[in-house]
């Protein structure tokens, strides 16, 4: 990498080779090392040039690897540009009066060492650096907002029963802790015994189970929720969602936050067959569209920062070093190989 | 039929012959004419004996013709007892201090001329008889409550777009009119051109279409809702629900009230594949469990009775004369042959 002060620097980048179907393989992406980037903005630009420090590895990214309609929320990846996702970055140069050189921000960026961001509409300045910077991809970033406001949608009350799927992930582990502090009984599902142990030992879940070892999800849910589920925070969709709907209590609430079980085969995704049970049980189901809550980010920070500083909330991260390991990290995430919020550490400053 | 004053009277009854799969045929039910009923309650009973005047023909009844789990809301029909459903009846004898001989009630009763009701927990005394008695099976009964409070769940605002399926049915025709009076743009779907015309000419819908003539429901919805749907009141489920989810607006609301398209094949019901769109669009979906609103019936009556008396709301009924025509009516309802709220007139007093 060339010295930062020069106009051009070399810029390692991760590209998607072609649109895919089925499970993402590491080989579907490639790392290009022969690119350079201008660190100087064009005259009059109100964008920014950033150095990426941490990149967030998130399930929704799989959806952008084919031409799937996200109703304008996301654009599918361009094949001739770096993959895009959330990240933490330092401003190298700014044409935006809200940001100055040296500021730290989080928001959408590229899977590359340096990015030119033409819009900073969805970017937040990082004001608090006494907490790990990587947290701004997770507990202090998009997943944290989704967990907090998504769980708030569920109006969980003390003594209620809460189920969280993908409970060890970047969102789920927070939802479980929020639910515990609301006085709920909380059960999580995850895809390995290691994660199940983590949920019970470190993340405060009352119970947890490995869904891969359950041949009958309905029976598993009835074992942990003999009286039914008041609140389900869904990160997986598919068969788990279908089994949960059958096991909801009267006037239960479901937050739909993600459907990772379906992302690899989104064009032939499974249907939810048990919605009729939502009629009999007056169940409410609501989609967690995280951008909706961005204006409430300051309120969320006021709530969460003290908990982090006082050690009252845990956050498990699974950090991979080096942009070149990004393709394997994302392919692994979609097979559930990560343990905790998956992050790529790109640079240390 | 024997004279009413005697202890025993003959009592024509409709039975389900056996549990069924697939479409209900008239021949799956039978009319028995050789039964009698005691018009005298046992000593100490707090039930009532009633003479049934109108019986309501409702889609959910099909679900009770097989051993389908309605989560305790309904019991499937017993084969050795008359079919049960909503109805309007006159009290012949009462052991319940809330009802006296001669009172009119509506609530669950049997498909027979006289019924002995051991519980009157879900029964309402009819206080207002200046409106048609048959209305207590529809606009003034369970369908009216479902339409009113189900639509209230949707929080429709002036200028919003509302779609109602099975729009000419006992619930749908009311939802459309409530939506119009809330200042919404309202489109209904129905299964015949006759119903479509009725929706536009008599029931005040802005637009209506015959879903059977649409090869592509998504395209049909885009034609009527180029900017998307704010509120969907779902009476049909299945493919229509799936198409609607794709066409909802940001923060749209869906009331799940019924799934008539699935009742004939409930054990192999279609899945809803597009719930992922509810995430991107922050859509809220809620089941309309009508019993939840029974305590609010007096408030609903205060709202709806003046509208009926002043001719400000229409209600289309499809009344069949004679209990012996009940099996054909119910089989026909499940094929969409009725036009308006389907009712059996059993007796005139």
Image: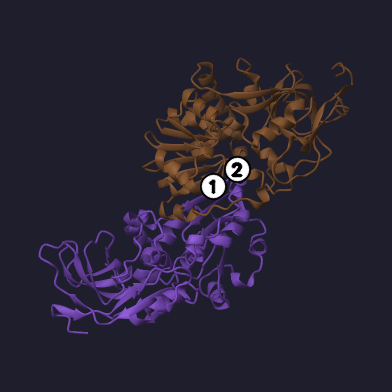
Chain colours: A brown, B purple
**Mark earlier in primary sequence (2, 1):** 1
Identify whether A342 is placed above or below A256: above
- Name the residue tied to disc 1: A239
Query: Does residue B268 lie above or below A204 as drawn?
Result: below
Chain of the residue under the numbered disc 2 shown in the image:
A
Is the C terminus of chain A in the top left, top right, bottom left or bottom right quadrant? top right
Are labels 2 and 1 on one chain?
yes
Q: Residues within 10 Å of mark 1 (few under 14, many from 20)?
A: some
Q: CA–CA distance between discs 2 and 1?
A: 8 Å
- Residue B142: quarter of image: bottom left
* Residue at the spot of label 2: A261
Instruction: Give coordinates of residue A277: x percent, y percent.
Output: 45, 53
In the image, taking residue A73 as reference, residue A229 lies left or right, namely: left
Q: Is residue B48 left or right of residue A349?
A: left
The crowd level at tag 2 (other Cα within 10 Å; few <14, some 14-19, many 20+) is many
Name the foreground residue: A283 vs B303.
A283
Asked where in the image residue A114 lies, by quadrant, the reply is: top right
Give x and y (percent) for residue A265: 66, 47
Q: Residue visible at 70% across and 35% down?
A: A331
Q: Are marks 2 and 1 in contact (CB under 8 Å)?
A: yes
Picture coordinates of residue B144, whole percent (x, y): 40, 64
């Amino acid at each position: 990498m060339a010295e930062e002060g020069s106009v051009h620097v070399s810029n390692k980048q991760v590209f998607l080779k072609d649109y895919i179907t089925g499970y993402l393989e590491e080989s579907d992406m490639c790392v290009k090392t022969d690119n350079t980037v201008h660190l100087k903005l064009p005259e009059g630009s109100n964008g920014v040039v950033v150095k990426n420090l941490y990149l967030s590895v998130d399930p929704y990214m799989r959806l952008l690897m084919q031409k799937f309609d996200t109703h304008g929320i996301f654009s599918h990846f361009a094949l001739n540009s770096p993959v895009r996702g959330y990240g933490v970055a330092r401003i190298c140069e700014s044409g935006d009066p809200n940001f100055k050189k040296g500021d730290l921000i989080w928001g959408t960026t590229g899977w590359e060492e340096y990015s030119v961001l033409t819009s900073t509409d969805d970017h937040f300045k990082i004001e608090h650096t006494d907490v790990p910077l990587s947290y701004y991809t997770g507990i202090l970033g998009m997943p944290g907002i989704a967990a907090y406001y998504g769980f708030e949608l569920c109006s969980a009350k003390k003594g209620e029963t809460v189920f969280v799927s993908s409970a060890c992930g970047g969102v789920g582990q927070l939802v479980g802790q929020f639910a515990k502090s609301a006085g709920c009984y909380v059960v999580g599902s995850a895809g390995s015994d290691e994660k199940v142990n983590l949920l019970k030992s470190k993340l405060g879940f009352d119970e947890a189970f490995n869904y891969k070892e359950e041949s009958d999800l309905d029976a598993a849910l009835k074992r942990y929720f003999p009286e039914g589920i008041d609140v389900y925070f869904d990160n997986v969709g598919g068969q788990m969602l279908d089994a949960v709907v059958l096991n909801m209590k009267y006037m239960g609430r479901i937050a739909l936050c993600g459907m990772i079980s379906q992302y690899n085969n989104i064009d032939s995704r499974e249907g939810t067959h048990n919605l009729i049970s939502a009629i009999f049980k007056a169940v409410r189901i609501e989609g967690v569209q995280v951008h909706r809550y961005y204006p409430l980010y300051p309120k969320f920070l006021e709530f969460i920062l003290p908990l982090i500083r006082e050690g009252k909330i845990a956050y498990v991260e699974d950090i991979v070093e080096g942009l070149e390991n990004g393709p394997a990290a994302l392919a692994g995430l979609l097979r559930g190989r990560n343990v905790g919020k998956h992050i790529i550490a790109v640079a240390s400053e």
